[in-house]
Image (cartoon, rainbow, N blue to C red):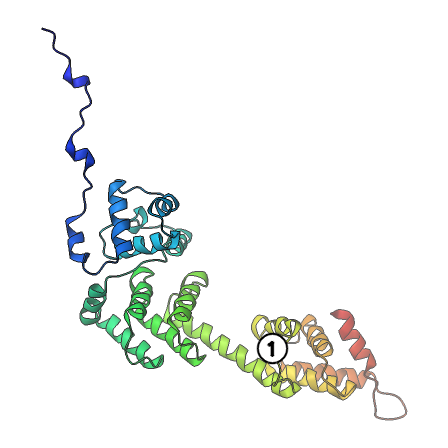
């Protein structure tokens, strides 16, 4: 009787037709949505390796719904992605990681526990509720806030400062807070409260300078043109001219033309900048020196046309 070598055989058993689910998923059956449960079953059926687009097609669900469901289960820690447990070495890797993983969703029970156990997070929640005039934060608000605090890992004191910045500008939505916080923390690398203070002081000075000039030039009641925005960015953000210096250039322009002209004001400032003049005192001395050199011999008046032409030609 011949006996076949069973080591060369491939056997199929009932276990091959079974989908194994993590036991901890039982704790979320009552709170997870039908779509979230379907996605978890699909992931387990595929042994944890899926293509989101293919999953959406096979489940007949929108790709965004699948991604949101994945985010939900990641929030419960029942599933993880490789980068969930990694420790990126470079800032670029950290940024790329957080940009990809923007769907982190936390279980309401977990959020409630964090508010009760983590004093820093509790303080942050209360601060947002007060400054955004919300009374209490709903589940989505808490999720967004904890995402910034836990996943992006923004320090609570820095987040409080960003909340103040949003409230000052009457931007009191959680979506705006999330966008602003991620932009400041990751894109502009403002990762300490001291850096935030410096940034906010610069922004306040920038906005204040524009407001003062708009009132001075009589253009406060209309929107700014693209050219004005670009020019003001140079004046108040890039070169940070003293406002008295800008006001002086404006007065020279109006005295000459009897009206506001952005090109003339900017040309004068450009001339001073090119000559290394960065203060109001220096600008005034430059003009007085020019007057003295161009006095007419028969009286005390002076011809200012050359000053404008020189300024415009230097632009």
In the displayed image of the protein, which residue is found farthest to the left?
1
Q: Quadrant of the N terminus?
A: top left
Indicate the position of residue 197 as horizontal and vertical percent values: 42, 75
Reading the image, the residue beneath label 1 is 241
In the displayed image of the protein, which residue is found farthest to the bottom?
299
101, above or below 288, in the image: above
Indicate the position of residue 72 as horizontal and vertical percent values: 28, 57
| Rendering quarter of residue 16 | top left
Residue sitting at 15 percent across and 17 percent down? 6
In the displayed image of the protein, which residue is found farthest to the right?
298
Residue sitting at 26 percent across and 61 percent down? 106
Indicate the position of residue 24 as horizontal and vertical percent values: 16, 52
172, 1: nearer the viewer: 1
| Rendering quarter of residue 32 | bottom left
Q: Judging from the image, what secondary structure is the residue with disc 1 in?
A: loop
Q: How many marks?
A: 1
163, 314: nearer the viewer: 163
Left or right: where does residue 230 sit relative to residue 72? right
Indicate the position of residue 138 as horizontal and vertical percent values: 29, 72
14, above or below 154, in the image: above
Q: Would residue 131 be seen by someone viewing this image from the given angle?
A: yes
Q: Would residue 80 be seen by someone viewing this image from the given angle?
A: no
295, 35: nearer the viewer: 35
User: Badge 1: few (under 14), some or many (20 or more) residues near its Cα, within 10 Å?
Assistant: some
In the displayed image of the protein, which residue is found farthest to the front?
60
42, above or below 244, in the image: above
Left or right: where does residue 234 sit relative to residue 25? right
Q: Quadrant of the C terminus?
A: bottom right
Residue sitting at 29 percent across and 51 percent down? 84
71, above or below 304, in the image: above
């Amino acid at each position: 009787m011949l006996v076949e070598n069973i080591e060369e055989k491939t056997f199929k058993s009932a276990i091959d037709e079974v989908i194994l689910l993590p036991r901890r998923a039982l704790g979320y059956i009552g709170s997870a949505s039908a779509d979230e449960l379907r996605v978890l079953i699909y992931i387990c059926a595929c042994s944890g390796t899926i293509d989101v687009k293919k999953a959406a097609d096979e489940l007949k669900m929108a790709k965004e719904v699948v991604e949101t469901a994945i985010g939900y289960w990641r929030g419960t820690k029942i599933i993880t992605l490789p980068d969930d447990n990694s420790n990126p070495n470079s800032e670029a890797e950290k940024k790329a990681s957080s940009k990809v993983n923007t769907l982190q969703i936390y279980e309401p029970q977990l959020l409630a526990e964090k508010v009760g156990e983590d004093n820093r997070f509790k303080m942050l929640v209360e601060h947002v509720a007060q400054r955004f005039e919300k009374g209490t934060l709903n589940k989505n608000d808490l999720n967004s806030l904890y995402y910034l605090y836990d996943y992006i890992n923004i320090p609570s004191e820095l987040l409080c400062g960003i909340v103040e910045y949003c409230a000052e500008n009457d931007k009191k939505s959680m979506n705006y807070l999330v966008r602003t916080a991620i932009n400041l923390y990751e894109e502009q690398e403002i990762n300490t409260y001291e850096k935030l203070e410096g940034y906010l002081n610069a922004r306040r000075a920038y906005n204040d300078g524009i407001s003062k000039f708009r009132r001075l030039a009589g253009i406060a009641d209309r929107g700014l043109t693209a050219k004005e925005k670009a020019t003001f960015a140079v004046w108040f953000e890039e070169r940070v001219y003293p406002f008295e210096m800008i006001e002086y250039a404006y007065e020279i322009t109006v005295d000459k033309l009897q009206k506001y002209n952005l090109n003339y004001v900017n040309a004068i400032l450009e001339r001073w900048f090119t000559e290394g003049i960065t203060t109001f005192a220096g600008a005034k001395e430059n003009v007085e020196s020019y007057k003295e050199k161009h006095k007419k011999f028969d009286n005390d008046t002076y011809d200012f046309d050359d000053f404008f032409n020189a300024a415009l030609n230097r632009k």
